[in-house]
């Protein structure tokens, strides 16, 4: 046995050594390291805020039109549907799943909703409740196939993307379906009207859903289980968390929110279109990722996603105000996604 | 079997366990008292993991009995063992790196007030248990992924002893296997703290230096049989090595 080992075997020497370590300088280094780590963790949380502020200030300086109240309300209205669906996607990302079919669920439910209202003459609010439930059932199917049969949600929902788009086309025959609601219907008023004179109704729906979802995720037991499921599923199972149920509920929530989004769309445009939501899953994923929720689960927030959606909305709006070519919009969006993830990765690496 | 004169808290008598043609454990006797640290040593395949899985309820023995406070018990699953006050710290620690210390310690059994998580209550309880372990974790709100190996071990131990009221035995499978020398010392210190607080601790380790620095007794397994129990004060590393590899190999 070497000298070190002899020291270790002699337990008095160990005690003395450990005491110096505990009270000594080594301890302080670790606390300092912990301090830096905490600071880095905070920076990670605020990088999205900084990006959103930079874009906001930049656009305000670049064009006087941007800061007008009407324009800001327009941006908020434009991101409402995006944010509502992205709320569900945030739950899925944190639990380490993905739903590529959100654009198709949204489009399919818009056609179903238009059919119920225009062809079955069912009260629009009752119809909306029905498509929200239907969205939940579609999420349930996605969740069950993913969790019970162990098929990656990427594949399951890629299938759903195609199936539900086909469903929307079959159900509508490829034609738009107009709602033909009466003058006195409360449906368009409460989904597209101006509340308190100026604020579009969609903004209330978006903020209401965002606040409730943020509460559930950060303040409830279920929320804690969503994070644990995506962070380390094995550990979550060992401590008795029903991770399959957590994931399935997240899929159901996403589907149900697609139903609400379909309701808001129909309230606004008055018709259901079979190609509604085509490619929308990419915008939704972009909002979530830009908002700081990583693809690999276990972290992220609903308010981050709101900022992500706001960044996308501001860029789209800003490019229009600045007179840029519409073809430039996807380029800008794509670049921001990559930059956001790159920034997050670099900060994470420095924190280690 | 000597036990410093204390009454054993957990006793195993004549435990055997077979997997197909492999006799993983044969007629093993084992006991441990409160405030005692027992090291379980042996070569790969000697039966250490099988034995702790029998104690933690993950495996059911084919023969033999388990007694707690002298009364026979029958563990059908890890939950039964947990009810009896036996907790296991997994080798990979089973921590969620992206979550803070509090979330990890209360993983799966979060405290709530109505619908809402009781963040304050959980943070205070976490602070208490970490203080008792005299851990150097800088804040209960730091992400576990940012902690050192020894600090992570402290979180896993804190979770194990905090799982429910009345935990009495902590089983640790290779707690220092992946740690540097400084972090190893901290974990050995944690084990001493557990002992001071009256916990019984079973430690599996390959490293005899560590075994000698923390254990009161050393239990040696070879090919599923218990081949020796030694008080630390009455043995040498050479003798333990001799027992581990077996006389015929020397």
Image (tube, coloured by chain):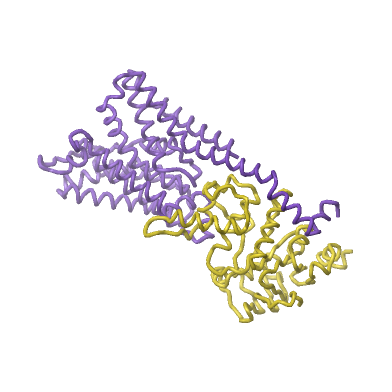
Chain colours: A purple, B yellow
A160 or A219: which is nearer to us?
A219
Quadrant housing the N terminus of chain B: bottom right
Hey, which quadrant is residue A263 in on the image?
top left
Extreme residue toward the left, this view: A183
Extreme residue toward the bottom, this view: B71
Is residue A11 placed above or below B217 in the rendered structure?
above
Q: Residue at x 40, y 54 (%)?
A: A220
Is residue A219 placed above or below B172 in the rendered structure?
above
Relative side of A147 to A310, left or right: right
Quadrant housing the C terminus of chain B: bottom right
B18 or A242: which is nearer to us?
A242
Residue A96 at x, y percent in the picture: 48, 47
B217 or A342: which is nearer to us?
B217
Is residue A115 placed above or below A199 in the rendered structure?
below
Hey, which quadrant is residue A178 in on the image?
top left
Let me know if residue B240 appears in the view.
Answer: yes
Relative side of A72 to A25, left or right: left
Q: How many marks?
A: 0
Let me know if residue A158 appears in the view.
Answer: no
Relative side of B98 to A319, left or right: right
A331 or A246: which is nearer to us?
A246
Residue A20 at x, y percent in the picture: 73, 50
Relative side of B185 to A188, left or right: right
Hey, which quadrant is residue A345 in on the image?
top right
Is residue A193 placed above or below A67 in the rendered structure?
below
Q: Residue at x 55, y 48 (%)?
A: B139
Residue B156 at x, y percent in the picture: 59, 56
Q: Residue at x 48, y 60 (%)?
A: B109
Residue B66 at x, y percent in the picture: 64, 77
């Amino acid at each position: 046995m070497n000298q070190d080992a002899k020291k270790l075997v002699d337990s008095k020497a160990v005690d003395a050594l450990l005491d110096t370590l505990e009270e000594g300088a080594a301890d302080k280094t670790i606390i300092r390291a912990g301090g830096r780590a905490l600071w880095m963790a905070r920076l990670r949380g605020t990088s999205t805020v900084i990006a959103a502020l930079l874009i906001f200030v930049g656009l305000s300086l670049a064009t006087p039109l941007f800061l007008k109240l009407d324009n800001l309300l327009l941006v908020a209205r434009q991101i409402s549907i995006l944010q509502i669906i992205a709320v569900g996607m945030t739950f899925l990302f944190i639990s380490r799943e993905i739903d590529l079919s959100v654009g198709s669920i949204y489009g399919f439910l818009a056609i179903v909703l238009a059919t119920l209202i225009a062809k079955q003459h069912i009260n629009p609010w009752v119809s909306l409740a029905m498509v929200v439930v239907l969205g939940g059932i579609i999420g349930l199917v996605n969740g069950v196939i993913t969790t019970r049969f162990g098929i990656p949600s990427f594949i399951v929902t890629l299938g759903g993307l195609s199936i539900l788009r086909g469903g929307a086309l079959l159900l509508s025959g490829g034609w738009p379906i107009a709602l033909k609601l009466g003058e006195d219907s409360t449906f368009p008023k409460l989904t597209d009207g101006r509340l308190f004179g100026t604020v579009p109704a969609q903004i209330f729906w978006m903020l209401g859903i965002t606040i409730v979802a943020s509460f559930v995720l950060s303040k409830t037991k279920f929320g804690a289980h969503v994070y644990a499921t995506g962070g380390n599923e094995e550990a979550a199972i060992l401590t008795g968390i029903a991770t399959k149920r957590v994931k399935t509920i997240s899929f159901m929530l996403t589907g149900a929110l697609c139903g609400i989004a379909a309701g808001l769309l129909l309230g606004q445009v008055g018709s259901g279109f079979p190609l509604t939501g085509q490619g929308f899953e990419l915008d939704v994923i972009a909002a979530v990722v830009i908002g700081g929720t990583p693809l690999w689960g276990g972290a992220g927030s609903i308010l981050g996603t709101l900022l992500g959606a706001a960044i996308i909305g501001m860029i789209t709006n800003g490019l229009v105000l600045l007179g840029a070519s519409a073809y430039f919009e996807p380029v800008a969006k794509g670049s921001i996604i990559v930059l956001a993830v790159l920034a997050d990765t670099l900060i994470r690496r420095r924190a280690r | 079997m000597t036990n410093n004169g204390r009454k054993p808290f957990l006793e195993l008598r004549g435990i055997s366990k077979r997997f197909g043609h492999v006799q993983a454990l044969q007629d093993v006797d084992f006991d441990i008292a409160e405030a005692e640290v027992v090291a379980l040593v042996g070569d790969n395949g000697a039966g250490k993991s099988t034995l702790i899985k029998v104690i933690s309820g993950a495996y059911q023995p084919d023969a033999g009995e388990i007694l707690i406070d002298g009364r026979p018990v029958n563990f059908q699953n890890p939950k039964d063992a947990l009810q009896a006050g036996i907790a296991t710290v997994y080798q990979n620690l089973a921590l969620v790196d992206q979550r803070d210390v509090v979330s990890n310690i209360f993983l799966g059994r979060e405290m709530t007030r109505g619908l809402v998580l009781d963040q304050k209550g959980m943070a205070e309880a976490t602070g208490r248990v970490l203080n008792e372990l005299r851990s150097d974790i800088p804040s209960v709100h730091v992400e576990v992924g940012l902690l050192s190996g020894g600090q992570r071990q402290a979180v896993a131990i804190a979770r194990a002893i905090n799982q429910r009221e009345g935990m009495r035995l902590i089983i640790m499978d290779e707690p220092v296997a992946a740690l540097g020398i400084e972090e190893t010392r901290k974990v050995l210190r944690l084990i001493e703290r557990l002992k001071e607080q009256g916990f019984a601790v079973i430690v599996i380790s390959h490293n005899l230096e560590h075994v000698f620095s923390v254990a009161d007794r050393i239990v040696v397994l070879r090919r599923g049989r218990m081949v020796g129990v030694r008080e630390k004060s009455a043995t040498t590393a050479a003798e333990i090595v001799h027992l581990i590899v077996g006389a015929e190999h020397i």
